[in-house]
């Protein structure tokens, strides 16, 4: 896992497809409003059926996003709050990134690129959720 930072700000956590350990691993701080888990098991592994308990969660925070690249390639750019570019990374099939703070943008590098985006919700609108800018 690569932590992309600038000063005290953690922009993103990048995990390349070969970095997932066997078993279950949760990525992200225990205090984070968004975490993701990776699971690698052999045939026959049983995950016991279960329910999740209702409990209090962090309520006020910036939107966090998680992208998983299914097919193709994107270039992810990461910006400080003053809109200056601090990092770029190319993400390809099997890679993932959790976006934590700062700004970010993406450029699709291959036709038919497919990725999944997961974020804490609810989604309201672009106007309510985002501040767009030209780098």
Image (cartoon, grey):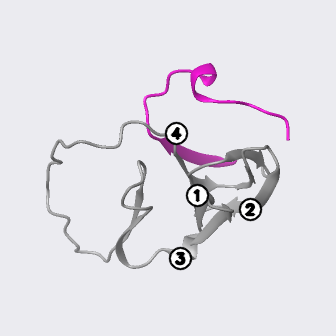
Q: Which circle marks residue 19 in the picture?
A: 3
Picture residue at 19% right of the left edge, 68% below the top: 46
Q: CA distance from mark 3 to mark 2?
A: 16 Å
- Identify whether 66 is placed above or below 44: above
Q: Which residue is mark 4?
A: 63
Q: Residues within 10 Å of mark 4 (few under 14, many from 20)?
A: some
Q: Which residue is mark 2?
A: 89
Give the SS element for disc 4. loop
Q: Which residue is mark 1?
A: 97
Q: CA distance from mark 1 to mark 3?
A: 12 Å
Tell me where residue 50 sits by quadrant. bottom left
Residues rendered magenta in the picture? 111-135
- Closer to the chain start, of discs 3 and 2, is 3
Give the SS element for disc 3. helix
- Identify whether 11 is placed above or below 56: below
- Closer to the chain start, of discs 2 and 4, is 4
- Closest to the camera, between mark 2 and mark 4, is 4
Q: Nearer the viewer, residue 10 or 74?
A: 10
Quadrant where the N terminus sits is bottom right
Give coordinates of residue 34: x percent, y percent: 43, 50
- Closest to the camera, between mark 3 and mark 4, is 4
Give coordinates of residue 41: x percent, y percent: 33, 74
């Amino acid at each position: 896992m690569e932590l992309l930072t600038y000063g005290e700000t953690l922009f993103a956590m990048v995990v390349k497809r070969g970095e997932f350990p066997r078993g279950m691993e949760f990525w992200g701080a225990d205090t984070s409003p968004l975490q993701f888990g990776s699971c690698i098991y052999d045939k026959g592994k049983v995950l016991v059926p279960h329910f999740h308990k209702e409990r209090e969660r962090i309520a006020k925070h910036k939107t966090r996003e998680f992208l998983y690249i299914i097919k193709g390639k994107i270039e992810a750019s990461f910006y400080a709050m003053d809109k200056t570019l601090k990092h770029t990374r190319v993400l390809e099939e099997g890679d993932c990134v959790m976006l934590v703070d700062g700004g970010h943008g993406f450029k699709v590098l291959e036709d038919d690129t497919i990725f999944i985006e997961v974020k804490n919700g609810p989604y309201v609108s672009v106007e309510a959720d985002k501040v767009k800018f030209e780098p």
